[in-house]
Amino acid sequence: MRTLVVGDIHSGVRALEQLMTKAKVTPNDHIVFLGDYVDAWSTAVETIDFLIQLQSEYTCTFIRGNHDELCRAWLEDQKENPQWLAHGGMATRESYLNADRDKWDIHLKFYKNLKNYHLTNDNRLYLHAGYTNLKGIEYEYFEQSFYWDRTLWELVTALDPDLTPTDPKFPKRLTHYKEVFIGHTPLSKNEFVHPQKKANVWNVDTGAAFKGGLTMLDVETKEYWQSDPVHTFYPGERGRN
């Protein structure tokens, strides 16, 4: 069994379909999705439909992203959130307004069942954004950090690459896990990029909401596959560009 981790999809289901073929994913594989399933492209409803169907055929773990939480809040009360609408929510709202209302209830259940993080027996941690507590995820005071925090990636990109985990200056919050896999902070908004590793943190958000592709990474071998730039599947649309 391979464990395959997928970066932020942002409603780009057409790119995900291409990735499933490129990586030759089988039901023997475990797919971990890092969140932000919606907000950017026009196929938000179709994306969630695809993921719901996928989990009936494959072993999947779905992590909660901040955009998923914003969408869930709107589906529950339709209260306008200008910040959400300005950052991809407009396309998602339009997608849901054109869908049957029975889909809303099904999708709300999907959003509510998302996990804030996934920690495996081999001590690999998967979450959308990050965590702030020096003692690790179990001690995090605010669960919103798991899908909103940007300081984890900011920390590792600023870290002296020569520091080792035994060095007293090495950040304590990085010492608890073998590897950490995140999305949330796009590695680029303007060009096609590859996933990056800093310290023991892998960022696989390669800008699918913007000008980048969608990425799937084998966590053991570090082989990865990328879709075509996601915007090319949606001609005439802006996404979050």
Image (cartoon, helix red, strand yellow):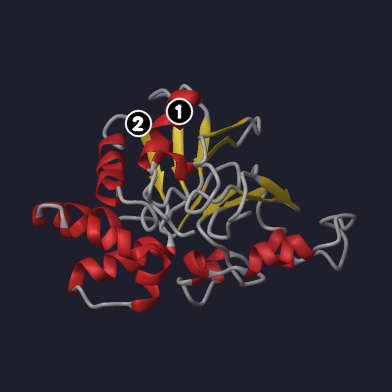
Q: Indicate which disc residue 154 carries.
A: none
Label 2, label 1: how far apart the Cα atoms are: 7 Å
Tell me where residue 159 sits by quadrant: bottom right
Q: Secondary structure at mark 1?
A: loop
Q: Secondary structure at mark 2?
A: loop
Left or right: 209, with 161 as reference point: left
State the residue at coordinates (31%, 51%).
42
Of the numbered discs 2 and 1, the one sitting upstream in the chain is 1
Residue 59 lies, in percent from the top left, at 37, 34
The residue wearing badge 2 is 58
Tell me where residue 105 sits by quadrant: bottom left
Left or right: 91, with 36 as reference point: left
Pointer 2 local density, CA inside 10 Å: few below 14, some 14–19, many at least 20:
some
Q: Is residue 208 above or below residue 159?
A: above
**Amino acid at the residue labelled 1:** Asp
Pointer 1 local density, CA inside 10 Å: few below 14, some 14–19, many at least 20:
some
Residue 26 lies, in percent from the top left, at 41, 23
State the residue at coordinates (51%, 47%).
7
State the residue at coordinates (43%, 48%).
9
Residue 79 lies, in percent from the top left, at 23, 78
In this view, the residue in front, 212 or 196, is 212
Q: Indicate which disc residue 29 carries.
A: 1
In this view, the residue in front, 205 or 152, is 205
Left or right: 1, with 195 as reference point: left
Q: Are marks 2 and 1 in contact (CB under 8 Å)?
A: yes
In this view, the residue in front, 28 or 50, is 50
State the residue at coordinates (65%, 30%).
221
**Amino acid at the residue labelled 2:** Tyr
Q: Is residue 233 above or below residue 153?
A: above
Residue 103 lies, in percent from the top left, at 15, 52
Q: Is residue 154 above or below residue 15?
A: below
Q: How many marks?
A: 2
